[in-house]
Each structure stands twice: as C-alpha cells, then as structure tokens.
Image (cartoon, helix red, strand yellow):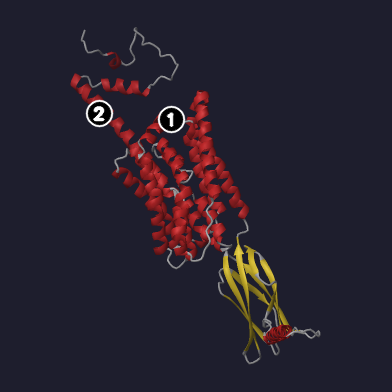
Amino acid sequence: MTHRGCLLLMLLAAVTSSSVAEEATTPEPATPAVLFTPGNLLKMPLDDVYDVVWTTTLLDVSQVVINVTDESVITVLVESEVIGIFDGTNVTYSGTFNVSADFIGVSTITVQLLDAQDKVLGTGELEASVILRYQKLVSIFSTSLGVLVALVNVTIGSTINLELVKNIIKRPVGPIVGLFCQYVCMPLVAFGLSQTVFAGTPVFQLAVFLTGCCPGGGQSNMWTHLLGGNLDMSIVMTFVSTIMAFVALPAWVLLLGPVIVRGATFSIPFGDIAMLLVTLIGPCFIGLLIQRFLPRISEYVKMGLTPFSIFVLLYTIAFGCASYRYIFSVMNTKIILGSLALPFIGYFLGLILGLVFRQPRKDAVAISIETGIQNNTIAIFMLNVTLVAPLSTLGIVIPATVFLFTPIPLVIVGFGRLGYRYYKSRKSGKVDMAMDNVEAEQNGKPDTIVATMSSRSSVAAPGSQVEAPHKNGIDNPAADLSDNPT
C-alpha cells in the first residue's frame, strides 16, 4: 500500500471515530414529566367538552394542581384523583380532567404534580384554542348579501344617466377627491386608531388597519341613493376605487403592516378584488340593457329601488347580527369606540373635502358615503389568511363590528332628512294658506279661503272625470263668487 493510501485510511478512521464519539456524547431528549392524551386541544369548537388523560413516570406523586392561563376561554370542570399504576410499564401515575370550550381564544393548561409535602415534582403544559362552531352561517350570510347587493346594482344600472357619467369622467374632480380620501386619508386614520385606541393588542391593531385600507363597500351606492346623493358619481367612484385597490391596498399593507405585526406574511386577495369588479360591472350592465331595451320594465325597477334598498339594509342588520353574534361577547369600550370612529371619520372627511373643493352637495354626499363605507369582506379574508384560528376569529371582530356600526350615522342622517322634509312640507303648506288669506283680505272676500281649501282637498285622480258645477243651484255660494260684481 502506498504512503498516500495509508494517510487516507488514517484520516477516514479518525473521522469515523470522532462521529461515533459525538453520537455517544449527544444527550437524548428528555422525556416530558407529564404526558397528555390528546397531545393538544387546538381548534376546539365552541361549547364542546373534552376528556384529557395525563400520565407520568415520576415517583411519589400524591396530588395534582391544574391551572389555566385564560379562564374565559376554557374551564377545567372535573379533576380525578391521582391513580397509581403498577402494570410493569414505566408509567407510575395517571389522572383525568374535563375541559370546556367557553369562548374563542387561546389558553394554556398547566398541570403540576406534587408529593405529600407539596413539593413540585414535575410540570406539563397543554395548549388549547377555541374556534367558532357556526362558520357556515357566516359563509351563508356573506354569499346571500353578495347576491342581494348584485340585485341592487341591477336596479341602480336601470337609473344610471350615461350622459352624466360621461361628464363626470371628463371633469373627474369628485372621483379624484374620493380617491384621496379613500387611499390616503383612511389608511392613515386606521393606522392612527391602531396605535391609540387599540394600543397593546396587535390582533385588533392589524384588523382595524386592514379594514381602513380596503376599497369602498358595495352598499355605498345604495346608501347614496337613500340619502339623496349623486348616484352616478357613486357608481364611478366605486368602479375607480376598486381598480385602484390592486395597487393601493398592497402598497399600504406592505408598508405599514410589518410595523404592526413583525414577521407576518400578508396575502393580498387579488381574486376577491377582481370579483368585486365583476359584481359591480355585470349587474350595472344588465340594468343598462333593461333601461335601453325594456323601458317599461325599467320604470318599475326604478320604483322598486328605494324599498328594495331598505329591505337589504334590514336584512343586513338582522342576519349580520345573527351571523356575528359572538362579537357582542367580545365588545368593550375600545372596540365600540374604534369601530364607530373609523366610518364616522371617513364620512366627515369625505364631506368636508368635497365641500372644500366646491363639489355640489349631492356629489359631496356621494364622496362622504364612498369614503366611510369600507368593503370589510376583503379585510376578513386577509385576516383569515394572515392569522391562524382562533386569532383570525378574534381579529374579524373589528371588521365585523365596523360592518354593523357603519350604518348607524347614516340611519341617523336618514331619519333627520325625513324629519326635515316633513317639517318643510308642513311649513310650505302653512305658507300657502297664509298667502291665500292675504289675497282674500286684499279682495275683501274672506270666504274665498273656504273655496281654496276645498279645491285643494279634492284632487281628481288621473283619468277620472270631474262633474261640472250645476247652474241651477250652488251648494257653497262662496265658490261661485267672481271679481266683477253684477
């Protein structure tokens, strides 16, 4: 054998012996002091009860102490006595306890084994989390609401004035102001709320920020119609806002998202954003076709827009509260304040900036509503992808609460508007009667008021025939008075 071959053999032997020595000196992982069956209680459905068995190989165990980090999430119901096992295995003692899933969240169960002198012999931890049981109800609500909003968009398409839409596009001051409010002001407002109202709660901080970055919601057009805004402006703004979401949403999320939750991986739902465009453009196009080729049906559709919009509003409130009923158990002052502040500030900013840029009142109303109503579905999707359950379920509390609270200022304004219109109509009627009194006094014939009121109270229905007055007798002589005395 050559000298080089001998060196190779010696080197190989040295490497082999060193690796064997390392394997011999590497300690084996220690056996946990307490083992659990099942090994974890992750994603327990709400209100379920689970049986847990613990075992140990320790000696002289006489008592067990069980603690829970968050008793609002899970509760230990029943604990068994320590049972000694003498079956020839390594297991020396065991016991059981029951765990109740009380509320969505994360908690840890700690089991301590003690001897007769209360000395801790060993400790074991069991991770637990609770998720919603009725996830399907939320999916049904989201799907049904999407269908109803699409039908509303069909009726809106039947009322669109294409000439006005062209004028808005030629002079797009309103849409530009709306985009500034939507994608500059609202993300900054949401980030400010995350750092002030929700400080110290990263899940809620991320949730309110993602909600504020979303484009305008599908119900903004409906509310614009109900509150007397420019519906054509609202349609154009919703379309442009959704297009801009492909760029603005990822930009803000990637810029400030890591500041809130370090190391998080964000997923932008481009597919959902594209679907928003489809559910907006498709139904509106169908409405335009109805308006163009079926004008009679279009008139009936226009008449049904307001009552159908009110129905969708009531459906949203009722079914939304039922679907997200768990949020009422989580609600506290911070959640209520933040969820009300986000849309309210959006309405205020949109209205003020619209008036500052000298937009007509109806256009300013459309800008205000488009800014304040966010598409919370996108925020919910991003939270589900970014966070694991039940943290995602807790995060969804914010966009769900914003969704339920968003109509509150609009409902107040709507009732105020109805009250004002009623007051104005009553006042207008009184003014007309006063004018009639003045005219009658000037003519020296106060009885003319009676005839005027009588003629106003008897309005002929369209298509009906009105009887001519009888010449052979007058029931009310004041009704036949003329200005020329005979």
What amino acid type should be assigned to the residue bearing mark 2? Ala
Quick one: which residue is furthest to the front in this view?
A: 2
Total tally of numbered discs in the picture: 2
Dividing the image into 4 quarters, which one contains the C terminus? top left
Above-or-below relation of 351 to 133: above
Q: Position of residue 11 (x, y in %)?
A: 69, 84
Q: Position of residue 96 (x, y in %)?
A: 70, 76
Residue at x 28%, y 31% (from the top left corner): 430
Q: Which residue is denoted by mark 2 in the rendering?
A: 434
What amino acid type should be assigned to the residue bearing mark 1? Leu
Q: Which mark is residue 246?
A: none
Quick one: which residue is furthest to the right in this view?
A: 87
Q: Position of residue 397 (x, y in %)?
A: 51, 58
SS at mark 1 in the image: helix
Kindly indicate the quadrant of the structure image that contains residue 135: bottom right
Q: Which mark is residue 162?
A: 1
SS at mark 2 in the image: helix
